[in-house]
Image (cartoon, grey):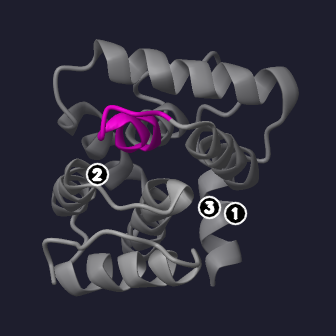
């Protein structure tokens, strides 16, 4: 199932052209970048997980991976809100792919082993904007937290 979602994400339009904010890959990269920086501290482990997720999800590496990561960072830094990115993902992803994307966001959040309230709030807002139900968001969080021994922090859903 997850492989099908990854395959769908890889095949989205825009994979050959220069990345732009309307490219679902850039929108996803920008949101993942945003949640990574939500607590104001970007740790190396979070940056590495961010790049791993982009590489795995979009089958990119080297210069192409660096360009996608940079495009996401640039798009996030220039954005005034999250809607520009969430609207792109909502148009291009089906329900299962949107749930899987929220799972990827939680993986970024828990990369450093801690859940910060601003990260929690960011994932909650993105989930709401892309139409992921509360119980699916909570389940994705629990799954991501379970993968990290000693994960700390309490979600507002608890």
Q: Residues within 10 Å of mark 2 (few under 14, many from 20)?
A: many
Q: Could you tell me which quadrant the C terminus lies in? A: bottom left
Residue at the extreme right of the image, as rendered:
62
Marking on residue 69: none
Q: Nearer the viewer, mark 3 or mark 2?
A: 2
Identify the residue shown where x is 67% and y is 34%: 15
Residue denoted by label 2: 119
Identify the residue shown where x is 72% and y is 23%: 66
Q: How far apart are marks 3 and 2 (CA)?
A: 26 Å
Q: Work out whether 54 lies above or below 18.
A: below
Query: Where residue 133 appears, x then y in whole percent?
Result: 20, 78
Q: What element carries label 1?
A: helix
Query: Where residue 118 appears, x then y in whole percent?
Result: 21, 48
Q: Give the range drawn in magenta.
A: 32-42
Residue denoted by label 3: 8
Identify the residue shown where x is 16% and y is 62%: 128
Q: Work out whether 21 lies above or below 5.
A: above
Q: Nearer the viewer, residue 119 or 4?
A: 119
Marking on residue 7: 1
Can you tell which quarter of the image residue 76 is in?
Answer: top left
Q: Is mark 2 on a helix, strand or loop?
A: helix
Q: What element carries label 3?
A: helix
């Amino acid at each position: 199932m997850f492989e099908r979602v990854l395959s769908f994400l890889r095949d989205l339009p825009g994979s050959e052209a220069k990345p732009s904010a309307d490219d679902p890959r850039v929108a996803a990269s920008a949101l993942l970048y945003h949640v990574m920086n939500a607590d104001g501290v970007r740790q190396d482990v979070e940056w590495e997980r961010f790049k791993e997720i982009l590489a795995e999800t979009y089958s990119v590496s080297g210069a192409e991976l660096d360009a996608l990561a940079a495009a996401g960072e640039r798009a996030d830094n220039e954005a005034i809100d999250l809607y520009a990115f969430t609207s792109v993902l909502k148009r291009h992803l089906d329900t299962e792919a949107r749930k899987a994307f929220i799972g990827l966001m939680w993986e970024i959040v828990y990369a450093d082993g801690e859940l910060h309230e601003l990260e929690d709030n960011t994932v909650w807002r993105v989930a709401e904007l892309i139409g992921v139900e509360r119980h699916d968001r909570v389940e994705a969080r629990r799954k991501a937290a379970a993968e990290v021994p000693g994960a700390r922090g309490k979600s507002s859903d608890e």
